């Protein structure tokens, strides 16, 4: 499989360090509010990546953090603490906020068929690990204390801007966000590893440390949680493009300074979902959440389908009109799958034919996880001259990756159309009638239709296939 690696700026063959095994890390949500559907675009595409790798036989171990401390409003080290802001907004404690929005995040993920990673670690449960790594960075000369905080010294690195050839002036962290610069920093790009109480007097979550009572910076969380659970060598690290700088740049700086060798080989970044007016936001305009989609009558899986229709390296524009189009296409797709399912009955698929049908899907996904072409491959399978049983088997199989719940939705549709469970006796007659029609024995087909009618059901051929309805 090939994927685009942000580190090399190239689409590369993905080769894990240990054959057949993949260590994968994902930056988790900051749990001060609901995730917006932009955040969830990243998690959907990462989910497809993980599932595709598993589907091709790789043994993936995936770890994700939950940011419940340390993330300030600016991705640099300025502004308010996001968690504290959330707690004040809702008159709750930080831990109450964290629990509520962590649960809400996983509830949204479940609705979108996003698998929970093998390990989920809230940052507040790994404080000892952060202190261990920061202590070592100080000992090695990569970190210093100033004004009560511990900073990473970016001037000690041969190369800090590993992803881009940035100059420090282009990236004045903090200044670009219109907030004050931190005069404790020796270099503009330096970042905080540990804050002490000097930062926020009303900080709720504080821990004892060799440098005073305080709390970790955001970046150190991911390095430590990854190393703790996946070891010194990471194959694949994921996140949205906004994480490239400064978050992932800082993760690499501190991890490699600590380890003394290269840490992660592949960096996978999902481009943003934007609204027609620009960046998706939790504070401005309509706050687009999974619940809002549901309130407006959309199945969350329509949103998953909408995301899969585009490549993860293209920014995607959300509008209700675009989502409507996705819904129409999704409904049609399910109707077609339902028809194929009815036609297939209990016939067995052919291994040779299903392998042939699967090949186009695999080719699309192997080419930098091109889900847009993967969906086209799905339509090609539906259009092909293969038998219904072959088509059904392949659709069922590739839906382990796409996770659109196609067969389940098709069953639901068939049930709705038939006004409840169709008795086995009727289904058997319908199957017999389909076979008779195929064999061009129309007299027998008519006879069978009469029998079905006598049992209280109507059977009709539509463009989508056989439809059974209660009379
Ligand atoms: P956060 O909860 O802010 O830490 O973000 C969670 C994830 O969502 C990160 O991987 C971000 O890079 C990603 N993200 C943030 N905004 C968007 C967006 N508009 N579209 C896609 N991914 C996003
Ligand atoms: Zn992270």
Image: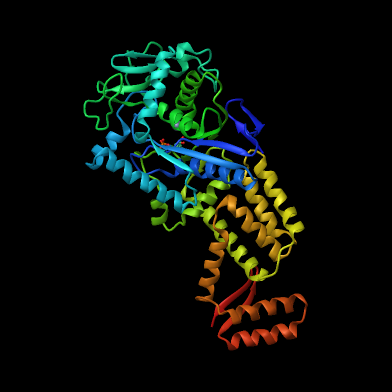
Residue 132 location in percent, x, y?
39, 23
Residue at screen point 34% across, 22% down: 194
- Choose between 312 and 355: the one closer to the eye: 355
Q: Is residue 129 above or below residue 338?
A: above
Q: Position of residue 464 (x, y in %)?
A: 64, 67
Tell me the quarter of the picture where residue 422 sits: bottom right
The reply to whether residue 271 is in sight is no
Residue occupying the point 46% across, 28% down: 223
Q: Measuring from the top left, give residue 425's x and y in whole percent.
A: 60, 82
Q: Quadrant of the C terminus?
A: bottom right
Residue 441 quadrant: bottom right
Q: Residue at x 50, y 35 (%)?
A: 25
Q: Is residue 42 left or right of residue 372?
A: left
Quadrant field for ligand 1: top left
User: Vertical placement of 61 versus 356: above or below?
Assistant: above
Residue 358 higher or lower than 26, as above or below: below
């Amino acid at each position: 499989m090939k994927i685009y690696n942000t580190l090399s700026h190239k689409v590369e063959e993905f080769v894990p360090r240990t054959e057949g095994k993949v260590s994968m890390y994902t930056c988790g949500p900051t749990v001060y509010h609901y995730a917006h559907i932009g955040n969830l675009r990243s998690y959907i595409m990462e989910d497809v990546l993980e599932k595709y790798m598993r589907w091709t036989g790789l043994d993936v171990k995936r770890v994700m953090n939950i940011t419940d401390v340390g993330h300030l409003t600016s991705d640099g080290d300025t502004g308010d603490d996001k968690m504290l802001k959330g707690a004040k907004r809702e008159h709750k404690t930080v831990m109450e906020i964290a629990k509520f929005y962590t649960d809400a995040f996983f509830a949204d993920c479940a609705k979108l068929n996003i698998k929970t990673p093998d390990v989920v670690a809230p940052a507040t449960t790994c404080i000892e690990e952060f202190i261990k790594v920061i202590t070592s960075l100080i000992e090695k000369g990569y970190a210093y204390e100033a004004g009560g905080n511990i900073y990473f010294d970016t001037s000690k690195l041969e190369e800090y801007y590993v992803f881009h050839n940035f100059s420090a002036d282009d990236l004045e962290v903090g200044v670009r966000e219109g907030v004050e610069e931190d005069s404790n920093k020796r270099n503009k790009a330096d970042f905080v590893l540990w804050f002490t109480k000097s930062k926020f007097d009303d900080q709720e979550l504080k821990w004892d440390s060799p440098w005073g009572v305080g709390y970790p910076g955001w970046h150190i969380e991911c390095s430590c949680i990854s190393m703790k659970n996946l070891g010194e060598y990471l194959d694949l690290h994921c996140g949205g493009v906004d994480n490239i700088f400064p978050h992932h740049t800082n993760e690499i700086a501190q991890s490699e300074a600590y380890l003394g060798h290269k840490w992660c080989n592949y960096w996978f970044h999902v481009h943003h979902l934007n609204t027609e007016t620009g960046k998706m936001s939790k504070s401005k305009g309509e706050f687009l959440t999974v619940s809002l989609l549901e309130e407006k009558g959309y199945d969350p899986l329509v949103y998953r389908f909408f995301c899969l229709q585009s490549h993860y390296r293209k920014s995607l524009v959300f509008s209700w009109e675009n989502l409507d189009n996705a819904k129409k296409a999704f409904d049609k797709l399910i109707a077609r799958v339902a028809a194929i399912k009815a036609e297939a009955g209990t016939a067995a698929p052919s291994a040779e034919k299903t392998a042939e049908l699967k090949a186009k899907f695999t080719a699309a996904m192997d080419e930098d996880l091109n889900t847009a072409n993967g969906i086209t491959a799905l339509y090609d399978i539906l259009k092909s001259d293969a038998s219904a049983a072959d088509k059904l088997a392949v659709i069922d199989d590739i839906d382990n990756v796409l996770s659109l719940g196609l067969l389940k939705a098709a069953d639901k549709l068939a049930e709705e159309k038939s006004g409840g469970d169709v008795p086995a006796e009727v289904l058997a007659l319908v199957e017999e009638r389909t076979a008779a029609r195929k064999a061009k024995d129309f007299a027998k087909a008519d006879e069978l239709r009469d029998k079905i009618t006598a049992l209280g059901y109507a059977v009709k051929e539509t463009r989508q296939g056989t439809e059974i309805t209660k009379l």
